[in-house]
Image (spheres, rainbow, N blue to C red):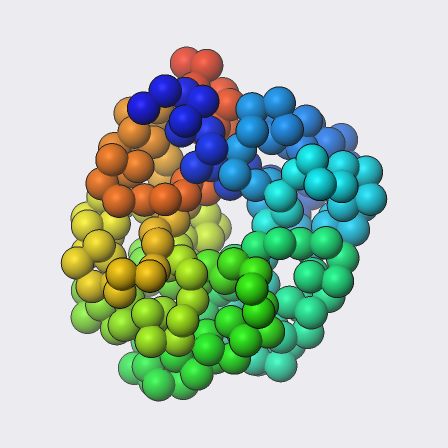
Amino acid sequence: MTNEEMLRHVDHTQLKPFATWEDIEKLCWEAIRYQTASVCVPPAYIKRIAEKYGEQINICTVVGFPLGYSVTEAKKAEIREALADGANEIDMVVNISDVKNHLYDKVEAEIRTLKEACGSHILKVIVETCFLTEEEKIAMCEAVTKAGADYIKTSTGFGTGGATMEDVLLFRKHIGPNVRIKAAGGVKTKEDMEAFLANGCDRIGTSSAVGILNGGEAQGY
């Protein structure tokens, strides 16, 4: 896979809480130049990006991020505002406490509700694998599949660990045919990107894809 082909699978990401407009503009410029799948940005920047760049750029944002424990109605409100401001894709965080309490039906119901709020827009479900057992990861594969979400995503990039090949392979085994995989966090080199894509990931979340593919290494998310 060429560098250009890999970049088309990248959600070019800037989610640091102290990100400035200059940081966001740089991200957007790189995304347009290198034709990444999207930019993944804080909700507060969506409208400004949409007004400046319009259809040149595909905007992804985060909901319930990064801890996941806001209530479903709050997450729905975030989605409604994000879509109204110009986002096309939503990366939501599950209620990790509900997962740890094995309230899988409740988690599935929330995902279904938020997918309904997204409508035809893509919903990616962040399950934060670093906090989960194998049993819980499998349960999340089932919940994401049954709820009709578009992607299962490994990590926020703000937990204690990021994507691993072990988790991606586990996802492949347990998700339904209509669910795709996004790896995020822990993507440190070009070889990492190639391996995740070769083993079933459709998207890679990273802040440093352009640097990685120019011979550098990822910094942060």
At x 19%, y 50%, the residue is: 169
At x 58%, y 68%, the residue is: 118
Residue 123 in picture, x, y percent from top left: 50, 62
Q: Is residue 84 above or below residue 50?
A: below
Q: Quadrant of the N terminus?
A: top left
At x 60%, y 41%, the residue is: 39
At x 49%, y 20%, the residue is: 211
**Is residue 16 among what the camera can see?**
no
Q: Foreground: 54 or 102?
A: 54
Q: Foreground: 195 or 35?
A: 35
Residue 215 in picture, x, y percent from top left: 41, 14
Which residue reaches farthest top?
Answer: 215
Q: Is residue 59 above or below residue 12?
A: below
- 39 displayed left or right of 107: right
Residue 19 in picture, x, y percent from top left: 69, 40
**Is residue 34 among what the camera can see?**
yes
- 209 displayed left or right of 195: right
Q: How many marks?
A: 0
Residue 67 in picture, x, y percent from top left: 51, 64
Q: Quadrant of residue 105?
A: bottom left
Q: Foreground: 77 or 219?
A: 77
- 157 displayed left or right of 105: right
Q: Is residue 14 above or below residue 147?
A: above
